[in-house]
Image (spheres, rainbow, N blue to C red):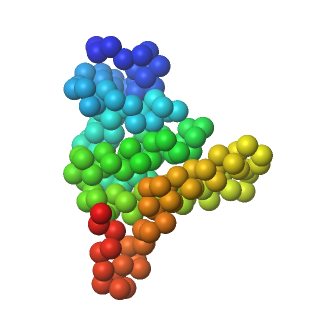
Amino acid sequence: MISLPSTIRYSAVYRHGARASRLLQTDRLDRSMVCECEAVTAGEVRYAIDELDVNNLVDLRRRTRVGMGTCQAELCACRAAGLMNRFEVATPRQSTTQLNAFMEERWRGIQPIAWGEAIREAEFTAWMYGSVLGLNDVKPLEEQAQQGTDSNEF
């Protein structure tokens, strides 16, 4: 078994049982962390795509718990969207559109219960993804289909 912290190995075994050893014995990219809160590695994302037929961020969240930790996808959603493209299950446009929808869903769940410092962190996350990463400029797929455009390519 490769040298990964025991918490990461235990999390993978908890989620995937005996199949976890296969996804833990892989290359350097697969050992990199995607979600620190839920201890999800890129290898686990690859496994979910290859073996569990995951083809979008919502299914990835259901299969691996990416974005369900204490930060509510603040740190990992962008990484996961990039891996969806890198592992060739989504185009850059699809990854960006999925990321936008995924983050809107996360924020919708946080907004009613946020208070004090939590609301400050949620607003910072919204600013970071919206302004710095450009998600404010992403149009939903339905809107693009009506207009006949593909404006989310970067």
The single residue placed furthest to the front in the displayed view is 132
Q: Position of residue 126 (x, y in %)?
A: 57, 55
Q: Is residue 48 above or below residue 140?
A: above
What residue is at 37 percent from the left and 85 percent from the top?
146
135, above or below 11, in the image: below
Please state which of residues 3 and 119 is positioned toward the viewer in this rendering.
Answer: 119
Q: Residue at x 44, y 55 (%)?
A: 133
Quarter residue 43 falls in: top left
124 displayed left or right of 88: right
Q: Is residue 68 among what the camera can see?
A: yes
Residue 26: give x, y in percent of width and height.
Answer: 23, 25
Image mark count: 0
Residue ranking furthest to the right: 116
Q: Is residue 4 above or below residue 16?
A: above
Question: Which quadrant would the C terminus be assigned to in this image?
Answer: bottom left
Residue 45 in the image, given as x and y percentages of width and height: 33, 39
Residue at x-position 57% and y-position 50%: 125
Relative to 102, say whether 15 is above or below.
Answer: above
Q: Position of residue 90 (x, y in %)?
A: 27, 57
Q: Examine the image and state in which quarter residue 12 appears.
A: top left
Picture quarter containing residue 48? top left
Of 3 and 56, nearer the camera is: 3
- Residue 22 visible (yes or no): no
The quarter of the picture where the N terminus appears is: top left
